Image: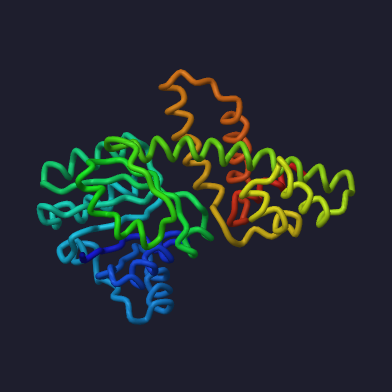
Amino acid sequence: MKTGWIGLGAMGAPMAGHLHAAGLLHGAWNRGAARRDAFADAYPDAAVAESPEALAEAVDVLALCVSADADLAAVLDRVADRLAPGTVVVDHSTVSPAAARSAHARLTQREVAFVDAPVTGGVEGAKNGQLAILVGGDAEAVQTLHPLFDAYGKVWKHLGPPGSGQAAKAVNQLIVAGIAEAVCEALALVEKLDLPADDMLELLGGGAAGNWFLDKRGRTMLADSFETGFEPALLLKDLKICRALADEAGLESTVLPGAIADYQRLVDGGETGRDISALIRLKR
């Protein structure tokens, strides 16, 4: 299997690195030269393609890890005509289910399969090869991707037709946002009540309040450090997708209005923290 990889951001680069270690990566490409260079430095014996078009022509599987609907469409504009019939495109980006269905319909006309497979598990999960992968698409195409998923995932499930993976990711992000709101408020209250931070982190993490976000971000939040993680603007984008799906489904969310307002305020205020846990700065 020859796999091409497009998108070498904080999540994409380590995922491509796992494919390289497994002998599955034929080449990688990123729109920005700085990230291409960083990937080449981190994996000096991995091939960096000259263009996405050249990469698309040379692979059996093309994996994408970009940011938003428009980015997915822009990549497909460049590569769709270069993909041979029988190629599988797997998109690990978080986009709307409608964008995934549109990509599937577009590529099907060229006899190219499209699988939407957003991931969750954070930058740590990408680096450690411990991601959860939420998969939508045709079963036959999904079956061919198991070697890739083995390289960087700890669990994956095929959830239904095209768009199902993205719908599931919206559900995931609703939970993420709710937990982030609660943990950031709670730790801001810890500070205001002048409770001992280390002791509180151990106690909260060891009881019913324990969760991934508290475990991975609690200490750094209290240290006012937000250098590694998931950028607030990306979560804001995801939550707007989730709001649209909730509206379509007739679900009245109590989490989404507050979370969207908070992250909009954070982004509009020019928050430079690189993780959604920077939300604690508002809660303080």
Residue at x-position 56% and y-position 48%: 232
Which colouring convention does the figure follow? rainbow
Percent x, y for residue 214? 67, 49
Near-viewer residue (208 or 89):
208
Residue 97: where, in percent of width, then height?
Answer: 34, 36
Residue 242 appears left or right of 273 = left
Q: Residue furthest right?
A: 194
User: Dividing the image into 4 quarters, which one contains the C terminus?
Assistant: top right
Residue 224 position, x and y percent, is 73, 57
User: At 43% from the left edge and 74% from the top edge, which residue is drawn?
Assistant: 38
Q: Is residue 138 left or right of residue 190?
A: left
Q: Residue furthest bottom?
A: 44
- Horizontal side of 91 relative to 169 (left or right) equals left
Q: Residue at x 78, y 45 (%)?
A: 188
* Horizontal relation, residue 85 to residue 153: left or right: left
Residue ID at (18%, 41%): 106
Which residue is more in the foreground, 194 or 206?
206
* Location of residue 100 (image quadrant): top left
Pinpoint residue 50: horizontal percent, then vertical percent: 25, 71
